[in-house]
Image (cartoon, rainbow, N blue to C red):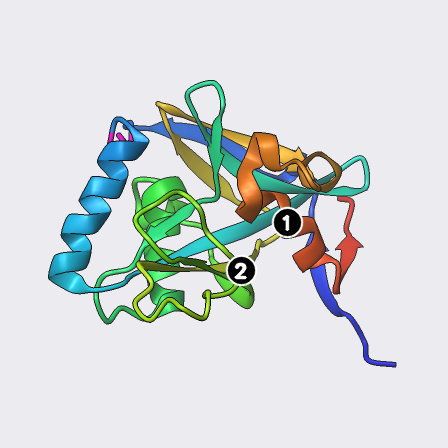
Amino acid sequence: MAMSQIVNTYPLSNYSFGTKEPKLEKDTSVADRLARMKINYMKEGMRTSVDAILLVQEHNHPHILLLQIGNTFCKLPGGRLKPGENEVEGLKRKLTSKLGGNSAGLVPDWKVGECVATWWRPNFETMMYPYCPPHITKPKECKRLFVVHLSEKEYFAVPKNLKLLAVPLFELYDNVQRYGPVISTIPQQLSRFHFNMISS
């Protein structure tokens, strides 16, 4: 039998959290975001984005760190790559921008691991799919999700206008209404891993 890959998860209490200047969203509405995506597509072609699955543990159960905007909308830390940018380096850049401290000594050691999912946006719409529909020859976005292995202790600087939440896998599972299809299916994508719960 094949061995499961191991993901070490450390207690949430191991990590320290501070704040930094707000990271304002470029768009005030979904319609604005899709309009901007259309303009960028005309200039640069398909959008490529990368998101991080950052895992911690509480009560001996894996939790994922999500950024909350306002009172309801949650997203994985990450974002759009520059044209031609390497996925791993781009994800590290995005994570540092979103959660890294203001000095080099306060930037976590981002260990980008396995790509666990690829999602496609066929049109300038909110819906994304874990496959590219066969009739779509020019998808508008490709989004990849990577497990990022955290060290035992880290400092995260959270922009003042965002909250960083640790959400248990059981809360995410099948909860499309609250988290959308990309985040709510992460528990299935992680089921092939063995979580090594390290208490310290």
* Kind of residue at disc 2: Pro
Characterize the local packing of mark 2: few (<14), some (14-19) or many (20 or more) Cα atoms within 10 angstroms.
some
Q: Is residue 58 above or below residue 192?
A: above
Q: Which mark is residue 130?
A: 2
- The segment highlighted magenta reads 23-27
Rendering coords of residue 165 (x, y %): 56, 31
CA–CA distance between discs 2 and 1?
A: 10 Å
Q: Provide the major secondary structure of the magenta segment.
A: loop
Left or right, residue 154 beside residue 45 = right
> Residue 38's spot in the image, x, y percent?
20, 50
In this rendering, position of residue 95 left or right of residue 38 = right
In the rendered image, the quadrant that contains the C terminus is top right
Q: In the rendering, which numbered label is found on residue 185?
A: 1
Left or right placement of residue 40 versus residue 64 in this view? left
Instruction: Tell me, yes or no, whether the two marked residues, 2 and 1, touch with CB atoms within 8 Å.
Output: yes
Of all residues shown, which one is farthest toward the top?
Answer: 71
Where residue 12 sits: x, y (%)? 65, 37
Task: Name the one closer to the observer, 100 or 139.
Answer: 139
